[in-house]
Amino acid sequence: MAVELETTPVLEARALGKTLGGNRVLDAVSLALPKGCVKVLIGPSGAGKSTLLQCLNFLIPPDSGTISLEGREVNAKSKRELCALRQQVGMIFQDFNLFDHLSALENVRVALMKVKGMSKLDAGELALAELARVGLADKAALYPANLSGGQKQRVAIARALAMDPKVMLLDEPTSALDPELIGEVLAVIRDLAQNGMTMIMATHQISFSASLADEFLFMEKGRVIEAGSPAELLRRDSGSRTKAFCAKISELTGEADDMGGECKV
Amino acid sequence: MDFTLAYNAAHEALPYMLGGVVWTVGLIVGAMLLGLAFGVPLAVLHVYGPWPVRRAVSTYVWLFRGIPILVQMYIFYFGLLAWLSGLPLFAGLGLDSPFVAAVLVLGLTSSAYQSQIFRGAIQSLHAGQLKAARALGMTDAQAIRSIILPQALRLSIPGWSNEYSILLKDSALAFTIGVVEIMARMRAIASTTHEPVSMTFLAGIIFFVLTWVGVKALNILESRVRIAGYTRQGAA
Protein backbone atom coordinates (compact mmCIF):
# COMPACT_ATOMS: atom_id res chain seq x y z
CA MET A 1 0.00 0.00 0.00
CA ALA A 2 2.93 2.31 0.74
CA VAL A 3 4.09 1.94 -2.84
CA GLU A 4 0.63 2.80 -4.03
CA LEU A 5 0.78 6.18 -2.35
CA GLU A 6 4.15 7.13 -3.70
CA THR A 7 3.61 6.52 -7.39
CA THR A 8 1.10 7.81 -9.85
CA PRO A 9 -1.39 5.09 -10.74
CA VAL A 10 -1.26 3.81 -14.31
CA LEU A 11 -4.99 4.23 -14.60
CA GLU A 12 -7.25 6.10 -12.27
CA ALA A 13 -11.00 6.63 -12.33
CA ARG A 14 -12.68 9.25 -10.19
CA ALA A 15 -16.37 9.25 -9.35
CA LEU A 16 -17.56 7.51 -12.52
CA GLY A 17 -21.30 7.69 -12.97
CA LYS A 18 -23.47 6.14 -15.65
CA THR A 19 -27.21 5.90 -16.02
CA LEU A 20 -28.63 3.53 -18.61
CA GLY A 21 -32.34 3.36 -19.28
CA GLY A 22 -33.12 5.07 -15.99
CA ASN A 23 -30.92 2.67 -14.01
CA ARG A 24 -27.99 3.99 -12.05
CA VAL A 25 -25.49 1.46 -13.44
CA LEU A 26 -22.45 3.18 -11.99
CA ASP A 27 -22.71 5.30 -8.89
CA ALA A 28 -19.64 7.44 -8.24
CA VAL A 29 -17.13 4.62 -8.62
CA SER A 30 -13.50 5.50 -8.03
CA LEU A 31 -10.51 3.25 -8.37
CA ALA A 32 -6.81 3.44 -8.98
CA LEU A 33 -4.54 0.88 -10.60
CA PRO A 34 -0.93 1.29 -9.47
CA LYS A 35 1.72 -0.14 -11.75
CA GLY A 36 1.92 -3.91 -11.64
CA CYS A 37 -1.12 -4.44 -9.48
CA VAL A 38 -3.94 -6.86 -10.22
CA LYS A 39 -7.43 -5.97 -9.10
CA VAL A 40 -10.40 -8.25 -9.48
CA LEU A 41 -14.00 -7.18 -9.79
CA ILE A 42 -16.56 -9.56 -8.43
CA GLY A 43 -20.24 -9.32 -7.79
CA PRO A 44 -23.60 -10.42 -9.11
CA SER A 45 -24.73 -9.91 -12.72
CA GLY A 46 -25.96 -6.41 -13.32
CA ALA A 47 -23.71 -5.01 -10.62
CA GLY A 48 -21.99 -2.80 -13.18
CA LYS A 49 -18.67 -4.65 -13.53
CA SER A 50 -18.75 -4.76 -17.30
CA THR A 51 -20.00 -1.18 -17.59
CA LEU A 52 -17.21 -0.02 -15.29
CA LEU A 53 -14.55 -1.74 -17.40
CA GLN A 54 -15.96 -0.31 -20.62
CA CYS A 55 -16.13 3.15 -19.11
CA LEU A 56 -12.44 2.95 -18.31
CA ASN A 57 -11.59 3.09 -22.02
CA PHE A 58 -14.72 5.04 -23.04
CA LEU A 59 -16.27 2.22 -25.05
CA ILE A 60 -19.22 3.30 -22.94
CA PRO A 61 -18.87 7.01 -22.26
CA PRO A 62 -19.45 7.73 -18.57
CA ASP A 63 -21.98 10.46 -17.71
CA SER A 64 -19.75 11.92 -15.04
CA GLY A 65 -16.34 11.46 -13.51
CA THR A 66 -12.84 11.46 -14.93
CA ILE A 67 -10.26 8.97 -16.14
CA SER A 68 -6.54 9.61 -15.92
CA LEU A 69 -3.80 7.64 -17.61
CA GLU A 70 -0.49 8.01 -15.80
CA GLY A 71 -1.73 11.12 -14.09
CA ARG A 72 -3.02 12.84 -17.24
CA GLU A 73 -6.74 13.33 -17.39
CA VAL A 74 -8.29 12.15 -20.65
CA ASN A 75 -10.40 14.65 -22.52
CA ALA A 76 -13.42 12.58 -23.48
CA LYS A 77 -14.48 15.05 -26.15
CA SER A 78 -11.33 14.60 -28.18
CA LYS A 79 -11.52 11.58 -30.46
CA ARG A 80 -7.77 11.67 -30.87
CA GLU A 81 -7.22 11.42 -27.13
CA LEU A 82 -9.71 8.56 -26.90
CA CYS A 83 -7.90 6.62 -29.62
CA ALA A 84 -4.57 7.35 -27.92
CA LEU A 85 -5.94 6.13 -24.58
CA ARG A 86 -7.35 2.95 -26.10
CA GLN A 87 -4.04 2.13 -27.75
CA GLN A 88 -2.48 2.02 -24.31
CA VAL A 89 -5.32 0.20 -22.58
CA GLY A 90 -5.80 -3.38 -23.72
CA MET A 91 -9.21 -4.97 -23.47
CA ILE A 92 -10.31 -8.59 -23.40
CA PHE A 93 -13.97 -9.43 -23.88
CA GLN A 94 -16.11 -12.26 -22.65
CA ASP A 95 -16.97 -13.35 -26.19
CA PHE A 96 -13.51 -12.73 -27.70
CA ASN A 97 -14.70 -10.44 -30.50
CA LEU A 98 -12.13 -11.66 -32.97
CA PHE A 99 -12.41 -10.29 -36.49
CA ASP A 100 -14.08 -13.19 -38.28
CA HIS A 101 -12.69 -12.44 -41.74
CA LEU A 102 -9.07 -12.36 -40.60
CA SER A 103 -6.74 -15.21 -39.69
CA ALA A 104 -5.25 -15.34 -36.19
CA LEU A 105 -2.13 -13.62 -37.47
CA GLU A 106 -4.10 -10.94 -39.31
CA ASN A 107 -6.25 -10.36 -36.22
CA VAL A 108 -3.13 -9.47 -34.25
CA ARG A 109 -1.53 -7.59 -37.14
CA VAL A 110 -4.35 -5.36 -38.33
CA ALA A 111 -4.27 -2.73 -35.58
CA LEU A 112 -0.48 -2.63 -35.63
CA MET A 113 -0.69 -1.61 -39.27
CA LYS A 114 -3.75 0.63 -39.18
CA VAL A 115 -3.25 2.26 -35.79
CA LYS A 116 0.48 2.16 -35.22
CA GLY A 117 1.36 2.51 -38.88
CA MET A 118 3.79 -0.40 -38.83
CA SER A 119 4.81 -2.04 -42.08
CA LYS A 120 3.16 -5.33 -42.95
CA LEU A 121 6.42 -7.17 -42.44
CA ASP A 122 7.24 -5.71 -39.01
CA ALA A 123 3.64 -6.05 -37.86
CA GLY A 124 3.59 -9.66 -39.03
CA GLU A 125 6.76 -10.49 -37.13
CA LEU A 126 5.51 -8.90 -33.94
CA ALA A 127 2.12 -10.58 -34.35
CA LEU A 128 3.75 -13.97 -34.71
CA ALA A 129 5.85 -13.35 -31.59
CA GLU A 130 2.74 -12.42 -29.63
CA LEU A 131 0.95 -15.52 -30.85
CA ALA A 132 3.95 -17.60 -29.78
CA ARG A 133 3.74 -15.98 -26.34
CA VAL A 134 0.22 -17.35 -25.89
CA GLY A 135 1.25 -20.70 -27.38
CA LEU A 136 -0.46 -20.33 -30.74
CA ALA A 137 2.38 -19.83 -33.21
CA ASP A 138 1.25 -22.94 -35.09
CA LYS A 139 -2.33 -21.63 -35.43
CA ALA A 140 -1.38 -18.30 -37.00
CA ALA A 141 -2.95 -19.11 -40.36
CA LEU A 142 -6.27 -20.36 -38.97
CA TYR A 143 -9.46 -18.32 -39.05
CA PRO A 144 -11.55 -17.74 -35.91
CA ALA A 145 -14.18 -20.22 -37.09
CA ASN A 146 -11.56 -22.95 -36.95
CA LEU A 147 -10.27 -22.14 -33.47
CA SER A 148 -11.59 -23.42 -30.15
CA GLY A 149 -12.97 -20.94 -27.64
CA GLY A 150 -9.82 -21.06 -25.56
CA GLN A 151 -7.66 -20.49 -28.62
CA LYS A 152 -9.85 -17.58 -29.70
CA GLN A 153 -9.46 -15.92 -26.33
CA ARG A 154 -5.70 -16.41 -26.45
CA VAL A 155 -5.60 -14.80 -29.92
CA ALA A 156 -7.61 -11.92 -28.45
CA ILE A 157 -5.07 -11.60 -25.65
CA ALA A 158 -2.18 -11.65 -28.15
CA ARG A 159 -4.00 -9.00 -30.19
CA ALA A 160 -4.27 -6.74 -27.17
CA LEU A 161 -0.71 -7.39 -25.99
CA ALA A 162 0.74 -6.61 -29.41
CA MET A 163 -0.28 -2.99 -28.89
CA ASP A 164 2.03 -2.95 -25.87
CA PRO A 165 -0.62 -1.70 -23.44
CA LYS A 166 0.15 -0.16 -20.07
CA VAL A 167 -2.85 -1.79 -18.48
CA MET A 168 -5.25 -4.57 -19.36
CA LEU A 169 -9.00 -4.67 -18.77
CA LEU A 170 -10.41 -8.18 -18.75
CA ASP A 171 -14.18 -8.56 -18.86
CA GLU A 172 -15.01 -12.09 -17.74
CA PRO A 173 -12.39 -13.62 -20.03
CA THR A 174 -13.37 -17.22 -19.28
CA SER A 175 -17.14 -16.97 -18.83
CA ALA A 176 -17.94 -18.08 -22.37
CA LEU A 177 -15.57 -21.05 -22.31
CA ASP A 178 -16.17 -24.74 -21.79
CA PRO A 179 -14.75 -25.83 -18.43
CA GLU A 180 -11.89 -27.79 -20.00
CA LEU A 181 -10.77 -24.75 -22.01
CA ILE A 182 -10.66 -22.32 -19.09
CA GLY A 183 -7.30 -23.54 -17.85
CA GLU A 184 -5.29 -22.55 -20.91
CA VAL A 185 -6.64 -18.99 -20.78
CA LEU A 186 -6.09 -18.67 -17.03
CA ALA A 187 -2.51 -19.85 -17.51
CA VAL A 188 -1.89 -17.00 -19.96
CA ILE A 189 -3.46 -14.49 -17.59
CA ARG A 190 -1.41 -15.79 -14.66
CA ASP A 191 1.70 -15.47 -16.78
CA LEU A 192 0.81 -11.86 -17.58
CA ALA A 193 0.28 -11.02 -13.93
CA GLN A 194 3.54 -12.61 -12.93
CA ASN A 195 5.34 -10.55 -15.56
CA GLY A 196 4.06 -7.41 -13.90
CA MET A 197 1.18 -6.41 -16.17
CA THR A 198 -1.22 -3.99 -14.52
CA MET A 199 -4.67 -5.51 -14.75
CA ILE A 200 -8.25 -5.23 -13.68
CA MET A 201 -10.42 -8.26 -14.30
CA ALA A 202 -14.08 -9.02 -13.82
CA THR A 203 -14.52 -12.73 -13.20
CA HIS A 204 -16.38 -15.45 -11.38
CA GLN A 205 -13.22 -17.57 -11.11
CA ILE A 206 -12.88 -16.88 -7.40
CA SER A 207 -10.20 -19.38 -6.42
CA PHE A 208 -8.04 -18.50 -9.39
CA SER A 209 -8.30 -14.78 -8.93
CA ALA A 210 -7.79 -15.02 -5.17
CA SER A 211 -4.38 -16.52 -5.86
CA LEU A 212 -3.53 -13.68 -8.22
CA ALA A 213 -5.20 -10.52 -7.03
CA ASP A 214 -3.75 -7.80 -4.89
CA GLU A 215 -7.23 -6.57 -4.23
CA PHE A 216 -10.80 -7.74 -4.59
CA LEU A 217 -13.44 -5.14 -5.38
CA PHE A 218 -16.96 -6.32 -4.68
CA MET A 219 -19.58 -4.50 -6.73
CA GLU A 220 -23.28 -4.35 -6.24
CA LYS A 221 -25.87 -1.98 -7.69
CA GLY A 222 -23.28 0.19 -9.37
CA ARG A 223 -21.05 0.65 -6.36
CA VAL A 224 -17.92 -0.88 -4.96
CA ILE A 225 -19.23 -1.93 -1.59
CA GLU A 226 -16.23 -3.89 -0.34
CA ALA A 227 -12.56 -3.72 -1.15
CA GLY A 228 -9.63 -5.54 0.35
CA SER A 229 -7.16 -8.33 -0.12
CA PRO A 230 -8.72 -11.66 -1.08
CA ALA A 231 -7.47 -13.22 2.14
CA GLU A 232 -9.15 -10.55 4.20
CA LEU A 233 -12.48 -10.66 2.41
CA LEU A 234 -12.67 -14.43 2.06
CA ARG A 235 -11.76 -15.26 5.65
CA ARG A 236 -14.39 -17.56 7.05
CA ASP A 237 -15.32 -15.18 9.86
CA SER A 238 -14.99 -12.00 7.82
CA GLY A 239 -18.76 -11.70 7.57
CA SER A 240 -18.18 -9.89 4.28
CA ARG A 241 -20.66 -9.69 1.44
CA THR A 242 -17.82 -11.00 -0.73
CA LYS A 243 -17.52 -14.13 1.39
CA ALA A 244 -21.26 -14.83 1.21
CA PHE A 245 -21.26 -14.32 -2.55
CA CYS A 246 -18.25 -16.57 -3.09
CA ALA A 247 -19.72 -19.26 -0.90
CA LYS A 248 -22.82 -19.22 -3.08
CA ILE A 249 -20.78 -19.50 -6.28
CA SER A 250 -18.72 -22.35 -4.97
CA GLU A 251 -21.86 -24.13 -3.83
CA LEU A 252 -23.30 -23.85 -7.33
CA THR A 253 -20.15 -24.90 -9.14
CA GLY A 254 -19.44 -27.73 -6.74
CA GLU A 255 -16.11 -26.23 -5.77
CA ALA A 256 -17.13 -26.30 -2.12
CA ASP A 257 -14.08 -28.20 -0.92
CA ASP A 258 -11.76 -26.05 -2.94
CA MET A 259 -13.32 -22.91 -1.65
CA GLY A 260 -13.28 -24.09 1.89
CA GLY A 261 -9.54 -24.36 1.64
CA GLU A 262 -9.29 -21.08 -0.17
CA CYS A 263 -11.38 -19.23 2.35
CA LYS A 264 -9.31 -20.34 5.30
CA VAL A 265 -6.35 -18.36 3.97
CA MET B 1 -48.38 -20.43 -86.59
CA ASP B 2 -45.61 -21.95 -88.68
CA PHE B 3 -42.72 -22.88 -86.45
CA THR B 4 -40.21 -23.10 -89.29
CA LEU B 5 -41.06 -19.56 -90.32
CA ALA B 6 -40.89 -18.34 -86.77
CA TYR B 7 -37.56 -20.05 -86.26
CA ASN B 8 -36.10 -18.60 -89.44
CA ALA B 9 -37.30 -15.11 -88.50
CA ALA B 10 -35.76 -15.44 -85.04
CA HIS B 11 -32.56 -16.77 -86.51
CA GLU B 12 -32.33 -13.85 -88.90
CA ALA B 13 -33.15 -11.35 -86.19
CA LEU B 14 -30.63 -12.73 -83.72
CA PRO B 15 -27.56 -10.62 -84.71
CA TYR B 16 -29.64 -7.43 -84.58
CA MET B 17 -31.10 -8.40 -81.21
CA LEU B 18 -27.69 -9.28 -79.84
CA GLY B 19 -26.56 -5.79 -80.79
CA GLY B 20 -28.97 -4.66 -78.08
CA VAL B 21 -27.15 -6.79 -75.52
CA VAL B 22 -24.25 -4.34 -75.61
CA TRP B 23 -26.60 -1.54 -74.53
CA THR B 24 -28.34 -3.65 -71.92
CA VAL B 25 -25.04 -4.77 -70.43
CA GLY B 26 -23.81 -1.17 -70.52
CA LEU B 27 -26.94 -0.08 -68.66
CA ILE B 28 -26.68 -2.63 -65.88
CA VAL B 29 -22.92 -2.47 -65.42
CA GLY B 30 -23.18 1.31 -65.16
CA ALA B 31 -26.18 1.11 -62.86
CA MET B 32 -24.75 -1.61 -60.61
CA LEU B 33 -21.48 0.29 -60.19
CA LEU B 34 -23.26 3.58 -59.56
CA GLY B 35 -25.50 1.76 -57.10
CA LEU B 36 -22.48 0.26 -55.36
CA ALA B 37 -20.60 3.56 -55.23
CA PHE B 38 -23.60 5.28 -53.63
CA GLY B 39 -25.08 2.30 -51.80
CA VAL B 40 -22.08 1.54 -49.56
CA PRO B 41 -21.70 5.04 -48.11
CA LEU B 42 -25.48 5.33 -47.81
CA ALA B 43 -25.59 2.10 -45.81
CA VAL B 44 -22.73 3.19 -43.55
CA LEU B 45 -24.43 6.54 -42.91
CA HIS B 46 -27.75 4.80 -42.37
CA VAL B 47 -26.24 2.64 -39.63
CA TYR B 48 -23.61 4.87 -38.02
CA GLY B 49 -24.62 8.41 -38.96
CA PRO B 50 -26.12 10.95 -36.56
CA TRP B 51 -29.90 11.07 -36.71
CA PRO B 52 -30.36 13.92 -39.22
CA VAL B 53 -28.11 12.03 -41.63
CA ARG B 54 -29.97 8.78 -40.99
CA ARG B 55 -33.22 10.59 -41.67
CA ALA B 56 -31.87 12.04 -44.92
CA VAL B 57 -30.67 8.63 -46.12
CA SER B 58 -33.97 7.10 -45.26
CA THR B 59 -35.82 9.79 -47.23
CA TYR B 60 -33.56 9.15 -50.22
CA VAL B 61 -34.31 5.43 -50.01
CA TRP B 62 -38.06 6.05 -49.73
CA LEU B 63 -38.03 8.32 -52.76
CA PHE B 64 -36.15 6.02 -55.09
CA ARG B 65 -37.92 2.89 -53.91
CA GLY B 66 -41.30 4.56 -54.01
CA ILE B 67 -41.34 6.18 -57.45
CA PRO B 68 -41.75 3.81 -60.42
CA ILE B 69 -38.70 3.56 -62.64
CA LEU B 70 -40.74 4.51 -65.69
CA VAL B 71 -41.87 7.73 -64.01
CA GLN B 72 -38.30 8.49 -62.98
CA MET B 73 -37.07 7.91 -66.52
CA TYR B 74 -39.52 10.52 -67.80
CA ILE B 75 -38.65 12.96 -65.01
CA PHE B 76 -34.91 12.61 -65.61
CA TYR B 77 -34.90 12.42 -69.37
CA PHE B 78 -37.60 14.93 -70.33
CA GLY B 79 -37.28 17.11 -67.25
CA LEU B 80 -34.18 17.30 -65.11
CA LEU B 81 -31.47 16.33 -67.58
CA ALA B 82 -33.04 18.19 -70.50
CA TRP B 83 -33.06 21.30 -68.32
CA LEU B 84 -29.52 20.76 -67.00
CA SER B 85 -28.01 20.21 -70.43
CA GLY B 86 -29.57 23.53 -71.48
CA LEU B 87 -27.45 25.34 -68.89
CA PRO B 88 -24.11 26.66 -70.17
CA LEU B 89 -22.26 24.87 -67.35
CA PHE B 90 -23.42 21.43 -68.46
CA ALA B 91 -23.67 22.04 -72.19
CA GLY B 92 -21.96 19.49 -74.38
CA LEU B 93 -21.58 16.88 -71.65
CA GLY B 94 -24.11 14.61 -73.29
CA LEU B 95 -26.48 14.79 -70.33
CA ASP B 96 -29.41 14.83 -72.74
CA SER B 97 -28.69 11.31 -73.99
CA PRO B 98 -31.26 8.67 -73.12
CA PHE B 99 -28.50 6.27 -72.09
CA VAL B 100 -27.19 8.67 -69.43
CA ALA B 101 -30.70 9.23 -68.12
CA ALA B 102 -31.36 5.49 -67.96
CA VAL B 103 -28.07 4.70 -66.19
CA LEU B 104 -28.72 7.47 -63.67
CA VAL B 105 -32.25 6.35 -62.90
CA LEU B 106 -31.38 2.66 -62.68
CA GLY B 107 -28.20 3.41 -60.70
CA LEU B 108 -29.81 5.74 -58.17
CA THR B 109 -32.74 3.40 -57.69
CA SER B 110 -30.34 0.51 -57.30
CA SER B 111 -28.28 2.48 -54.76
CA ALA B 112 -31.42 2.77 -52.63
CA TYR B 113 -31.99 -1.00 -52.79
CA GLN B 114 -28.30 -1.85 -52.45
CA SER B 115 -27.96 0.40 -49.40
CA GLN B 116 -30.55 -1.75 -47.68
CA ILE B 117 -28.74 -4.96 -48.67
CA PHE B 118 -25.51 -3.57 -47.17
CA ARG B 119 -27.30 -2.20 -44.12
CA GLY B 120 -28.75 -5.62 -43.38
CA ALA B 121 -25.31 -7.20 -43.78
CA ILE B 122 -23.64 -4.62 -41.52
CA GLN B 123 -26.28 -5.05 -38.85
CA SER B 124 -26.03 -8.83 -39.01
CA LEU B 125 -22.41 -8.60 -37.84
CA HIS B 126 -21.79 -9.10 -34.16
CA ALA B 127 -21.47 -5.62 -32.63
CA GLY B 128 -18.56 -6.81 -30.51
CA GLN B 129 -16.19 -6.64 -33.48
CA LEU B 130 -16.62 -2.89 -33.78
CA LYS B 131 -16.10 -2.62 -30.03
CA ALA B 132 -12.90 -4.67 -30.25
CA ALA B 133 -11.62 -2.49 -33.11
CA ARG B 134 -12.30 0.66 -31.11
CA ALA B 135 -10.68 -0.87 -28.04
CA LEU B 136 -7.50 -1.33 -30.10
CA GLY B 137 -7.46 2.38 -30.84
CA MET B 138 -8.95 2.34 -34.34
CA THR B 139 -11.03 5.29 -35.40
CA ASP B 140 -14.56 4.48 -36.51
CA ALA B 141 -13.56 5.12 -40.12
CA GLN B 142 -10.67 2.64 -39.85
CA ALA B 143 -12.86 0.07 -38.14
CA ILE B 144 -15.60 0.36 -40.73
CA ARG B 145 -13.15 0.18 -43.61
CA SER B 146 -10.98 -2.69 -42.46
CA ILE B 147 -13.27 -4.69 -40.17
CA ILE B 148 -16.94 -4.07 -40.96
CA LEU B 149 -17.08 -3.60 -44.73
CA PRO B 150 -14.90 -6.55 -45.76
CA GLN B 151 -17.33 -8.81 -43.94
CA ALA B 152 -20.52 -6.97 -44.85
CA LEU B 153 -19.67 -6.90 -48.55
CA ARG B 154 -19.05 -10.65 -48.56
CA LEU B 155 -22.40 -11.24 -46.89
CA SER B 156 -24.06 -8.95 -49.44
CA ILE B 157 -23.22 -11.00 -52.51
CA PRO B 158 -26.37 -13.18 -52.44
CA GLY B 159 -28.55 -10.08 -52.09
CA TRP B 160 -26.50 -8.43 -54.77
CA SER B 161 -27.13 -11.21 -57.28
CA ASN B 162 -30.83 -10.80 -56.59
CA GLU B 163 -30.47 -7.07 -57.22
CA TYR B 164 -28.62 -7.80 -60.46
CA SER B 165 -31.34 -10.00 -61.83
CA ILE B 166 -34.05 -7.48 -60.94
CA LEU B 167 -32.08 -4.57 -62.35
CA LEU B 168 -31.44 -6.46 -65.57
CA LYS B 169 -35.14 -6.72 -66.23
CA ASP B 170 -35.84 -3.16 -65.06
CA SER B 171 -33.34 -2.05 -67.67
CA ALA B 172 -35.84 -3.09 -70.34
CA LEU B 173 -37.79 0.05 -69.45
CA ALA B 174 -35.02 2.14 -70.99
CA PHE B 175 -36.54 1.51 -74.41
CA THR B 176 -39.33 3.94 -73.48
CA ILE B 177 -36.94 6.89 -73.64
CA GLY B 178 -35.13 5.59 -76.72
CA VAL B 179 -32.18 3.44 -75.63
CA VAL B 180 -31.83 0.81 -78.35
CA GLU B 181 -31.38 -2.11 -76.00
CA ILE B 182 -32.92 -5.56 -76.39
CA MET B 183 -36.57 -4.58 -75.86
CA ALA B 184 -36.37 -1.64 -78.26
CA ARG B 185 -34.90 -3.85 -80.93
CA MET B 186 -37.44 -6.57 -80.28
CA ARG B 187 -40.31 -4.13 -80.83
CA ALA B 188 -38.76 -2.65 -83.93
CA ILE B 189 -38.10 -5.99 -85.55
CA ALA B 190 -41.44 -7.43 -84.52
CA SER B 191 -43.28 -4.66 -86.33
CA THR B 192 -41.30 -5.11 -89.54
CA THR B 193 -41.29 -8.91 -89.63
CA HIS B 194 -44.81 -9.38 -88.21
CA GLU B 195 -43.38 -12.08 -85.93
CA PRO B 196 -44.13 -10.56 -82.50
CA VAL B 197 -44.43 -13.91 -80.74
CA SER B 198 -41.12 -15.37 -81.82
CA MET B 199 -39.35 -12.04 -81.29
CA THR B 200 -40.75 -11.69 -77.77
CA PHE B 201 -39.71 -15.25 -77.09
CA LEU B 202 -36.21 -14.52 -78.38
CA ALA B 203 -35.92 -11.42 -76.16
CA GLY B 204 -37.04 -13.52 -73.20
CA ILE B 205 -34.34 -16.10 -73.89
CA ILE B 206 -31.66 -13.42 -74.18
CA PHE B 207 -32.69 -11.88 -70.84
CA PHE B 208 -32.74 -15.31 -69.24
CA VAL B 209 -29.23 -16.11 -70.45
CA LEU B 210 -27.92 -12.75 -69.23
CA THR B 211 -29.49 -13.36 -65.81
CA TRP B 212 -28.00 -16.85 -65.66
CA VAL B 213 -24.50 -15.69 -66.62
CA GLY B 214 -24.49 -12.82 -64.13
CA VAL B 215 -25.88 -14.79 -61.21
CA LYS B 216 -23.45 -17.64 -61.90
CA ALA B 217 -20.56 -15.18 -61.98
CA LEU B 218 -21.62 -13.74 -58.63
CA ASN B 219 -21.96 -17.24 -57.17
CA ILE B 220 -18.40 -17.94 -58.23
CA LEU B 221 -17.27 -14.64 -56.70
CA GLU B 222 -19.07 -15.57 -53.50
CA SER B 223 -17.22 -18.86 -53.15
CA ARG B 224 -13.90 -17.27 -54.16
CA VAL B 225 -14.00 -14.72 -51.33
CA ARG B 226 -15.50 -17.08 -48.77
CA ILE B 227 -13.69 -17.12 -45.44
CA ALA B 228 -12.47 -20.48 -44.20
CA GLY B 229 -14.93 -22.09 -41.82
CA TYR B 230 -17.33 -19.17 -42.27
CA THR B 231 -20.01 -20.89 -44.34
CA ARG B 232 -23.58 -19.95 -44.94
CA GLN B 233 -26.04 -21.39 -42.48
CA GLY B 234 -26.78 -24.92 -43.50
CA ALA B 235 -24.06 -25.15 -46.14
CA ALA B 236 -21.68 -28.04 -45.81
Image: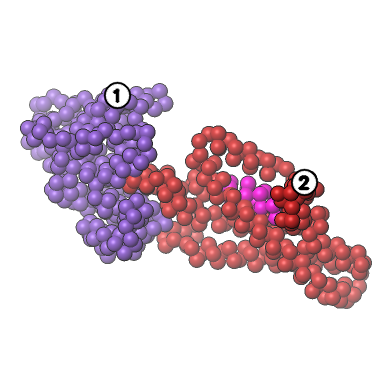
- Disc number placed over residue B83 in the picture, else none: 2
| Colour in which chain A is drawn | purple
Q: Mark 1 points at which residue?
A: A27
Image quarter hosting the C terminus of chain A: top left
Mark 2, secondary structure of its residue: helix
> As rendered, which of B81 and B156 lies closer to the eye?
B81
Q: Quadrant of residue A108?
A: bottom left
Horizontal side of residue A108 vs B39, given as left or right: left
Horizontal side of residue A261 vs B46, given as left or right: left
Which region of the structure is painted magenta?
B103-117
| Colour in which chain B is drawn | red
Q: Residue at x 69, y 64 (%)?
A: B25
- Disc number placed over residue A54 in the picture, else none: none
Q: Which residue is drawn at 91% across and 73% down?
A: B2
Magenta-drawn stretch contains B110: yes
Q: Which residue is drawn at 81% across and 71% down?
A: B16
